[in-house]
Image: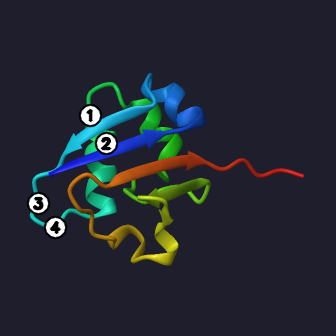
Amino acid sequence: MAIHVKLYGVFKTAAGTDSISLDLLPVKPTVRTALTELVSRPGSDELRALMLEGDSADPRSTTLILVSGHEIGALAGLDTELRNDDELSLLPIAHGG
């Protein structure tokens, strides 16, 4: 199953590209599965540090995640099932005052 990942801002810089295609093996992969696969790729240490909270597989609160244009909070969160050719968009959020 092919998933298209679009990276923005510092995620794009850390990955050295604005898009990555992932081939996910589980029958019903989820957003969590895709994120784990993404940060497990060789050379993804900086991306992992920017996107995930410590050593966990949980994304930082400053990471906005969309599946085919829909924010995962309005879906099933990290357990949102992915379909072939879905686009997973990862955007860093900057907070400040």
10 Å crowding of disc 2: few (<14), some (14-19), many (20+) = some
Residue at mark 3 to residue at mark 2: CA–CA distance:
15 Å
Are dots 3 and 4 in contact, CB under 8 Å?
yes
Mark 3: amino acid = Pro
Mark found first going from the N terminus, 2 or 4: 4
Residue beneath the point at 39% across and 52% down: 88
Disc 2: which residue: 38
Disc 3: which residue: 26
Residue at mark 1 to residue at mark 3: CA–CA distance:
17 Å
Q: Position of residue 40 (x, y in %)?
A: 27, 39
Mark 1: amino acid = Arg
Q: Is residue 73 left or right of residue 83?
A: right
Q: Position of residue 26 (x, y in %)?
A: 11, 60
Rendered image quadrant of residue 42:
top left
10 Å crowding of disc 3: few (<14), some (14-19), many (20+) = few
Tell me the mark number nearer the camera, choosing from 1 and 3.
Answer: 3
**Secondary structure at numbered mark 3:** loop
Are dots 1 and 3 in contact, CB under 8 Å?
no
Mark 2: amino acid = Leu
Q: Is residue 10 left or right of residue 15?
A: right
Mark found first going from the N terminus, 1 or 3: 3
Mark found first going from the N terminus, 3 or 2: 3
Are dots 2 and 4 in contact, CB under 8 Å?
no
Disc 4: which residue: 28
Rendered image quadrant of residue 5:
top left
Disc 1: which residue: 41
Are dots 1 and 2 in contact, CB under 8 Å?
yes
Tell me the mark number nearer the camera, choosing from 2 and 4.
Answer: 4
Residue beneath the point at 43% across and 25% down: 17
Mark 4: amino acid = Lys
